Amino acid sequence: MAAPSSTSPLYRAGISSDSVRTCSTADGTTFGTAFIDPGENWCGVRCPVCSSDIEDWWGNAMDTAALPDGYFDALAVTMPCCSAQTDLNSLDYVEAAGFASYSLVTTDPECELPLPPASLQALEDLLGTDLRQVIARY
Ligand SMILES: [Zn+2]
């Protein structure tokens, strides 16, 4: 993959061309949906319908939904607090987190985070999909 030009949305966002990661096993043959977490920035998770703190329930729900290889398939869940039907990707993660089959990763970006809405929109337009910024610290 060629290095992005200085005018590309990826470059302006501080993302280099070697930082697109697919969620695959070590041998690269199996792709899946991975949980992209904020690491030390984790601040809990709430019900997207009634805002109850569901962190204790969430850990078990993640264990139940995880496949043996650590990836995820079905994300549908029923909230323990209000019985709402939703999915693990739609929960109210206090610091953004989510599920993805690929991620754009930049380490020590040369820009302020989170990316401004215009930069995020440019990336979404380029890729033709919605994006979620997960600001992780490890
Ligand atoms: Zn609820």
Image (tube, rainbow, N blue to C red):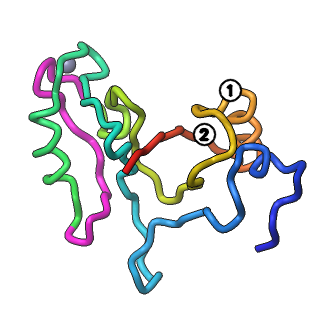
Q: Image quadrant of ligand 1?
A: top left
Q: Amino acid at mark 2?
A: Asp
* Highlighted magenta segment, given as a residue range: 68-85
Which of discs 1 and 2 lies nearer the camera? The answer is: 1
Q: Please, is residue 117 above or below residue 21 in the view?
A: above
| CB-based contact (under 8 Å), mark 1 and mark 2 | no
Placement of 83 over or under 64, stated as above or below? above
Residue depicted at x 58% and y 41%: 131
Quarter holding the N terminus is bottom right
Crowding near the residue tagged with mark 2, few <14, some 14–19, many ≥20 C-alpha atoms within 10 Å: few
Q: Main secondary structure of the magenta part?
A: loop
Give the residue type at disc 1.
Answer: Pro
Q: Which residue is mark 1?
A: 117
What residue is disc 2 on? 130
Above or below, 13 against 120 in this view is: below
Q: Is residue 16 left or right of residue 66?
A: right
Q: Which SS class for mark 1?
A: helix
Q: Residue at x 78, y 44 (%)?
A: 12
Q: Earlier in the sequence, mark 1 or mark 2?
A: 1
The image quadrant that residue 104 belongs to is bottom right
